[in-house]
Image: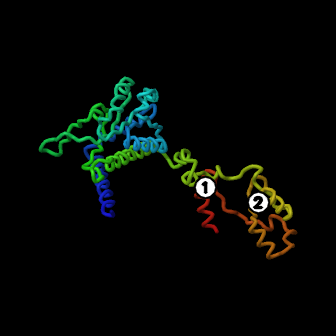
Amino acid sequence: MKHVGENVVRIEAEALRALADRLAGPMAADFQRALELMFDCQGRVVVTGMGKSGIIARKVAATLNSTGSPALYLHPVEALHGDLGMIVRGDVVLALSASGETEEILRLLATIKRLQVALITMTCDEVAAAGADKSVRATRGSTLASAADVALDCSISKEACSLGLAPTASTTTMLALGDALAVALSEKRGFKEEDFANLHPGGKLGKRLARVESLMHSGEAVPRVNAATKMPDVIYEMSRKKLGVTAVVDGDQLLGVISDGDLRRLLQQRGKDTLDLTAQDCMTRTPKTIGPEEFAATALARMEEMK
């Protein structure tokens, strides 16, 4: 069974290598044209596909959305029962079909053409023989690819399934080509880390990309005392605001900070005499600071470094 698993991965890896070779050579112009159509799109990229290709289409739409290119997934069957209204002038349709003959998708072509919406396709259909000169690209034969403004070639030598039937290498190439389009589009748009952060506020990514300003306390929530404040009042302010630290300020100028750790060390060293001191006597001067526009992960890394 280990060899079966290895063989599957090798077949799919070879399909990806062949796809990369096409992108570097005969398909480079088609890829660039597809990229331009999607970049110039005044509406959304409508991604459609049936079966396993439909699952890949959903992933492609999701990746486009998360990298700054508005997209949606359109189920071909639902489209035939009213959801065609989701396609409007100015959109671009990206249709995925391994055979290029998926009936439900072909039935959408008339509406796509009537709306004058650009059509990009990903198909894995067989290519007619090109003759003795293998460097000559053959004409694609599927109905879907023939109807496209840009037809992208996801053809494979074979599926990784031992029966040669289950979509495996074909869906892998479609997924990789969808990622290639999404990433190339994001770079063309100048999509930055902060843009990504704005679209991913939740989960681990959201936490890693959150800004300091979205997590920090401000205004009256921040404990603050003057340099001359006596330590009993400092302790009261820290206890009242419950942040384990207080800023020592002169107006809007930060002079230093006092943490609950500072208090514990002072009490161990000086006992009750600590209560006779002022904030200025106890504060840590010139504390490390970070701007509100910085990433929270950067702030955490600096705090870890300064331990």
> Seen in the image, is 255 located left or right of residue 167?
right
Tag 1 secondary structure:
helix
Residue topped by disc 2: 246
- Tell me the quarter of the picture where residue 128 sits: top left
Tell me if residue 280 can be seen: yes
Where residue 295 appears, x then y in whole percent?
A: 58, 54
- Alpha-carbon span between mark 1 and mark 2: 20 Å
Residue topped by disc 1: 296
> Seen in the image, is 60 located left or right of residue 234?
left
Q: Is residue 176 above or below residue 83?
A: below
> Seen in the image, is 150 located left or right of residue 213?
left
Where residue 53 appears, x then y in whole percent?
A: 37, 42
Tell me if residue 188 can be seen: no
**Residue positioned 46% across, 37% down in the render:** 72
- Tell me the quarter of the picture where residue 300 sits: bottom right
Give the quadrant of the C terminus. bottom right
User: What amino acid does circle 2 point to?
Assistant: Thr
